[in-house]
Image (spheres, helix red, strand yellow):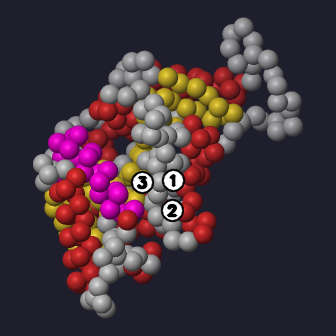
Amino acid sequence: MSAASAHAFGEPLDLPLVVGVDGSEPSLRAVDWAADEAALRGASLRLVHASLWERYEGVSPAADTEEPSEELMAEDVVGAAERRAHRRQPGVKVFTDVLPEEPEYALTRESRCALLLVLGRRGRSGMAEALLGSVGVAVAGHAHCPVIVLPANQAGQGRPRRIVLGVGDSPAGSAAVRFAAEESLLRGVPLEAVRAWRRRHPYAPHAHPPTADGPARPQERQAMDLVEQALHDSPAFPGARHRTVEGRAQDVLPAAAHGADLLVVGARRRQGHFGQQLGRVARGALHHADCPVAVVPEPV
């Protein structure tokens, strides 16, 4: 059974949390987050540096040395990450590896035997703060286990804790729904299921009074039915909240998840030259959410 399937169906497997590290501050913050999650789950931590990362992201390691060789630089990267993990969670077992290959291929392969794959979102200049590196997009689109991408600056201090689930078109049997249920129970925080909907006629009046039986618009009723189906199929959601919001899902979900512990979205494999690719909803969540985003692969 794959890591994604095992997690979705609650099968207990001794799998590590894998973190992609590149020497940048965002990746070190990802180490902190993953170390806490490993301690919460009683899992080990595996820190992986793909040594060709620099050619894709222009990475500048946190510890500068004079003209370091690629081998020494890689050792510095994983060494700094390992020390950080030990300081954060001394009781968590930490393993490291340097893989001399492109990061998207190395991390996608690592995802086959990972409980979670964790990455930090990074921007290099100007409006890049709002963008996700090309490696993160590629890995989130191809991984076999849930991928957690952390924002550069997380909002949420002082806000109520919660897990936000973006409800897709097929909630029945959804791996994202089950993953969100597990995370809600694991953390002991409420779950909020959100479904976006849009009018079929963009020039219709904005105001439309509801009927006694519920929402008047068929699109809104359909959205509410999908949310209720998602919660009904997951009995692990006692007291879960749900709502529907008019708008594009790629805009609605980041706004709904402002300050949340985690935003969970599903990703279906798309056959093509580059294999699985992320849809607009997952990309919107990754690019714009100010909380950690879990992209959960859905079975074909």
Q: Which residues are magenta?
A: 26-45
Magenta: main secondary structure equals: helix
Q: Are marks 2 and 1 in contact (CB under 8 Å)?
A: yes
**Which numbered tag is attached to residue 132?**
2
Residue 118 visible within the image: yes
Q: Are marks 1 and 3 in contact (CB under 8 Å)?
A: yes
SS class, disc 3: strand
Amino acid at the residue labelled 1:
Leu
SS class, disc 2: loop
Q: How many residues crowd mark 2 within 10 Å: few (<14), some (14–19), many (20+)?
A: many
Q: Residue at x 18, y 46 (%)?
A: 43
Measure the alpha-carbon separation of dots 2 and 1: 7 Å
Q: In terms of sequence position, does the residue under pointer 3 or pointer 2 come before the other?
A: 2
- Spot occupied by residue 73 in the image (x, y as percentages of width and height): 27, 81
Q: Residue furthest front?
A: 158
Q: Residue furthest bottom?
A: 67
Q: Is residue 64 above or below residue 208?
A: below
Say whether residue 33 is left or right of residue 277.
left
**Which numbered tag is attached to residue 286?**
1
- Spot occupied by residue 155 in the image (x, y as percentages of width and height): 49, 45
**Which numbered tag is attached to residue 149?**
3
Q: Residue at x 64, y 26 (%)?
A: 222
Q: Are marks 3 and 2 in contact (CB under 8 Å)?
A: yes
SS class, disc 1: helix
Measure the alpha-carbon separation of dots 1 and 3: 7 Å
Q: In terms of sequence position, does the residue under pointer 2 or pointer 1 come before the other?
A: 2
- Spot occupied by residue 183 in the image (x, y as percentages of width and height): 34, 35
Is 225 in the magenta?
Answer: no
Is 32 in the magenta?
Answer: yes
Say whether residue 181 is left or right of residue 134.
left
